[in-house]
Image: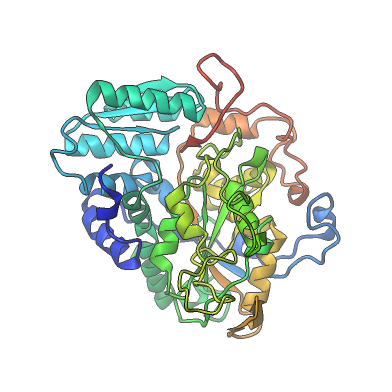
Amino acid sequence: MGDISKTLPLARSSVQSAHELIKPHIHRTPVLTCKTLNDLASTPQTPESLIGTPFEGQTPARPRINFFFKCENYQRIGAFKSRGAFHALARLGDEEVKNGVVTHSSGNHAQALALAARTRGIPAYIVMPTISTPSKIAATKGYGAEVIFSGSTSEEREAVVEEVIERTGAVLVPPYDHPNIILGQGTMALEMEEQVREMVRGESGLSVHGGGDEGGGVDGARNGEIGNGDSNSTTNAHHTHTPGRLDAVIAPCGGGGMLSGIATALHGTGTLVFGAEPAFQGADDCRRSLANLASSTSTSTSSSPQRITSVKTLTIADGLRTPVGGIPWSVISSGYGPNSNSNTNSSPDSKPPKKVHGVYSVTETQILAAMRLVLERMKVVVEPSAVVGLAVALFDEGFRGVVEREGKGGVEREGKGVVQREGKVDDGWDLGVVLSGGNTSVEALASLFGGAGRGTGEGVGKGKGMGMEKEERVEGKVGLDGGREVENVAG
């Protein structure tokens, strides 16, 4: 998709430029709050609920969290992907796109690029694995794209994409591994920080820092439109509170385009950024890659494990079945590992500041529990991939412990440096949570929650009560021949 060296740098100013470019084509999606979910997240888990988890035997964390949900399920095509697709096409000249565009995607990027291409008046060719959900296939066709099916391995998919390019001359617009995609996705963070600031200015009780519970949101939703990862979670930016500024944002991570875009947009603002992944069948490649990097030594050789590049998972979070791309990884991994400092004149112990302060993973059961809460308490329809960040905040004791420590102030140590934390004791965090999409169907929801014993919320911390672990995935067959193999399926 053109010469990457000629794209704008991955910087906040570039995200602002991207936002101005795509504003006519996207929705300014609302930010919602929910007091019930604030209360649930701010209540310690029981020791019994941690039995059988990595946190068994630990004293449950006691964080205080107020949520601000950025509802990208209300974005055009029902997911955040419209931002990156419209921005990528806006940066391409007429001569470059005269033969159309092509991509590979299991659904959301497919729909986004199809819509952006239709708006531009050019053809779109979408290679979709047969594992894609029927509703996403139908929607992609509905936007006028030509859908070509492939198997679900990267080799099969890339072969079909090459065939399409040879046949049509279309230009490839990747789902996440390109600066223009990253910058487009980051625009949601600009909106979110502005919306939260406006909300808290109008009703200070929405913030944990604002005093009082009377404004803490309502069941249903308040419209704001006017480790898992514990080894990766130490912060290294002076974090003082400004009224209306989010303490942190957590977002899903598949290919990493959205997470790296948000991290780029918020870098230097004082808002920390975290990622969330499903753990099922190794879908938490980013968390594990960061752990590999953080545990490597200065004497490690080039053969030492770093970024994991292959993921074979059938997690119900079907938009997160792909590994982090190389360009998003360069943002997400910044500040990790012993050799990350590019300034050769600096102390060997110094590192560039982290842009992503940790990535955490959750079980299928926890994803379903979070999804049920959003459906029933906020009355908001989301797909499983959308709620992994909320699930981390509710159930991951590593992340919850970070919120407790950071919210109380004090001293956080990283290497030989000492990072001062400020704020009133027990202030807690205002946490932005990205609900990334809502492209599901009544049939899919019935399959997810219709089984006996599912969705009860019983024992969600240790993965009981929903019976998902040993059951077949509900999102269709894998492979053109019906084989049960899947690899690196982009959302």
Place residue 211 in its image quadrant: bottom right
Place residue 476 in its image quadrant: top right
Q: Residue at x 22, y 34 (%)?
A: 118
Give x and y (percent) for residue 143: 29, 30
Place residue 162 in its image quadrant: top left
Q: Would you place residue 172 above or below residue 240 in this image? A: above
Q: Residue at x 61, y 86 (%)?
A: 424
Give x and y (percent) for residue 412: 65, 79
Q: Nearer the viewer, residue 18 or 168?
A: 168
- 215 with respect to 198 (left or right): right
Q: Nearer the viewer, residue 466 or 160?
A: 160
Look at the image and tell me whether residue 446 can be seen: yes
Furthest residue to the top?
481
Give x and y (percent) for residue 35: 57, 64
- Please identify the quadrant where the N terminus is shown: top left
Look at the image and tell me whether residue 133 can be seen: no
Q: Nearer the viewer, residue 349 or 287?
A: 349
Furthest residue to the left?
95
Q: Residue at x 31, y 61 (%)?
A: 9
Q: Nearer the viewer, residue 62 or 375?
A: 62
- Number of on-image labels: 0
- 201 with respect to 404 (left or right): left
Give x and y (percent) for residue 387: 56, 49
